[in-house]
């Protein structure tokens, strides 16, 4: 095998201006974080709302929640992103469509589609976690709440949500790491995030093994940091008295 | 409605290609499931064994594969499989590289997830079962093969199938390495005939229908298998 090793590839000049390949990786990392933050914010807000809807007494609210989860969990994420990127803009009203296609750059539209698509996909998963968390509470909590004269709104605000959100932190943190990993799929609709930067660099330099290794390490580090951060959060928010509560 | 008729007319022409794409998808899913469960079971047994080295290896394997995105794993193997093949045999890989490397990648990637399911399944069997097997004079291999694993697999079949449905959806990601699976065939045809919107929606509908029916079937099976 005549493979020429070059672990210093990241510090080589790209030949474009005075940037090194490290700059490209950092740019990619930046886009990864942008997509992850936007998508996770959408997922957390929408997922919580849908999760609560699935536990409400109202039939309509439950129906909407169930339909959303069924739809978004049974279509592969890649196809969802393609739908947001290629299909949905065609159905926008003409003025918005023109603005979308002409005034926004291809990278911007890809970025928006990918973030929104990933957010809505992850929302279905968050929704299921929130629902499980609420359903896992002892029935007595709900009954006691009503017996004290709480309205449904107050019941959720003061009794159910403060407890369930603390118990679902572990599954939520695994959804968060999934969400970060799934940002890599955005590279397939043309976002210049870390995986697509990695591909470009490996094509330019032919140092595939080195550059793939670096990106793999970056992902391991990100994942490790996220898990540590969520563990700390879990410890601080533990519900005293539950099995998971005392150490 | 012209929108739809144009698509339906073209669908008749592209049907053989789409069927072929579906057969590739199924090939990847089925071989990755079988291989993944086998490797996953081995990993789970290693994880539960009392040998420190095996234990650490299994733990490191699972953590590694769970912290990197599937897409990256696919790209690694798409690059590495021909590379290693040439390094080992000295010849160039002449068979379908994309297919072989995606099967290998999915097998090893899913093994990490399957092993967690199998581990939980084994751990859910009461300790008395192992103790009873040893008391009857069985060896470790016999007790696992005859007593523990049959019970564990019965319990975890629904979970393993659920993971297979996820694998079926994730298999669309072979798009990245150019393998013409069901989704990519749709995409390529749609792009070629300027029917991209219709073909993407059609592919989405097919994956949706298959996954939903399969999920429903798994739920029914779960009720049947409950001990």
Image (cartoon, coloured by chain):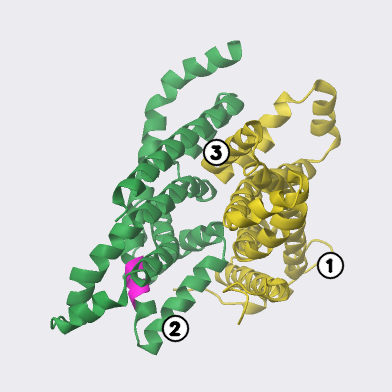
Chain colours: A yellow, B green
Magenta stretch holds residue A201: no
Dot 1: chain letter: A
Please state the total of marks drawn on the protein image: 3
Q: Residue at x 37, y 40 (%)?
A: B217
Q: To which residue does mark 1 refer?
A: A18
Q: Residue furthest top?
A: B1
Displayed quadrant of residue B54: bottom left
Judge by depth and name the residue closer to the eye, B192 or A240: A240
Instruction: Look at the numbered disc 1 and give the secondary structure of its residue.
Output: loop
Chain to which mark 3 belongs: A
Q: Which residue is mark 2?
A: B56
Between residue A54 and residue A75, name the one nearer to us.
A54
Q: Please state the horizontal and vertical placement of residue A235, each as a whole percent of the image.
A: 68, 76
Among the 4 quarters of the image, the one containing residue A208: bottom right
Q: Point out the frontmost of discs 3 and 1.
A: 3
SS under mark 2: helix
Measuring 54% from the left and 39% from the top, which residue is drawn there?
A: A75
- Horizontally, residue B188 falls left or right of residue A202, namely left
Q: Is residue B189 above or below residue B62?
A: above
Q: Chain of mark 2?
A: B
Residue that carries the numbered disc 3 in the rendered image: A70
Left or right: residue B12 compared with residue A73:
left
Q: Which segment is the magenta one?
A: B40-45
- Position of the N terminus of chain B, as image quadrant, is top right
Indicate whether B1 appears above or below A80: above
């Amino acid at each position: 095998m005549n493979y020429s090793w070059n672990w210093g590839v990241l510090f080589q000049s790209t030949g474009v201006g005075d940037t090194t390949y490290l700059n490209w990786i950092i740019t990619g990392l930046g886009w990864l974080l942008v997509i992850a933050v936007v998508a996770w914010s959408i997922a957390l807000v929408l997922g919580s709302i849908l999760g609560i809807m699935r536990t409400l007494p109202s039939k309509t609210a439950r129906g909407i929640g169930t339909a959303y989860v069924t739809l978004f969990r049974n279509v592969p994420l890649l196809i969802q992103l393609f739908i947001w990127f290629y299909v949905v803009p065609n159905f926008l009203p003409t003025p918005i469509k023109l603005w979308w296609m002409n005034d926004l750059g291809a990278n911007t539209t890809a970025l928006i589609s990918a973030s929104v698509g990933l957010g809505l996909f992850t929302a279905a998963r968050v929704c299921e976690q929130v629902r499980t968390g609420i359903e896992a509470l002892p029935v007595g909590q709900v009954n006691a709440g009503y017996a004290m004269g709480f309205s449904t709104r107050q019941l959720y605000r003061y009794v159910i949500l403060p407890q369930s959100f603390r118990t679902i932190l572990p599954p939520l943190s695994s959804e968060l790491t999934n969400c970060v990993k799934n940002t890599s799929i955005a590279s397939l609709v043309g976002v210049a995030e870390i995986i697509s930067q990695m591909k470009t660099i490996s094509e330019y330099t032919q140092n595939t093994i080195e550059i793939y290794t670096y990106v793999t390490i970056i992902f391991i580090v990100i994942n490790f940091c996220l898990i540590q951060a969520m563990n700390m959060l879990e410890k601080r928010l533990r519900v005293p008295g539950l099995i998971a509560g005392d150490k | 409605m012209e929108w739809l008729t144009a698509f339906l007319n073209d669908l008749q022409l592209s049907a053989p290609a789409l069927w072929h794409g579906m057969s590739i998808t199924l090939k990847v899913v089925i071989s990755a499931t079988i291989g993944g469960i086998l490797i996953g079971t081995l990993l789970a047994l290693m994880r539960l064994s009392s040998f420190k080295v095996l234990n650490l290896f299994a733990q490191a394997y699972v953590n590694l594969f769970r912290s990197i995105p599937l897409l990256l794993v696919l790209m690694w193997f798409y690059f590495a499989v021909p590379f290693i093949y040439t390094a080992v045999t000295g010849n160039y890989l002449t068979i379908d590289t994309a297919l072989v490397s995606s099967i290998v990648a999915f097998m090893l990637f899913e093994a990490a997830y399957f092993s967690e399911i199998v581990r939980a399944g084994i751990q859910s069997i009461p300790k008395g079962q192992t103790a009873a097997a040893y008391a009857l004079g069985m060896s470790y291999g016999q007790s696992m093969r005859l007593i523990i694993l049959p019970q564990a697999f019965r319990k975890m079949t629904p979970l393993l199938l659920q993971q297979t449905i996820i694998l079926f959806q994730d298999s669309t990601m072979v798009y990245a390495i150019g393998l013409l699976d069901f989704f990519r065939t749709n995409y390529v045809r749609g792009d070629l005939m300027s029917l991209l919107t219709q073909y993407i929606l059609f592919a989405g509908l097919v994956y949706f229908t298959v996954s939903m029916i399969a999920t429903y079937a798994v739920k029914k099976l779960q009720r049947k298998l409950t001990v």
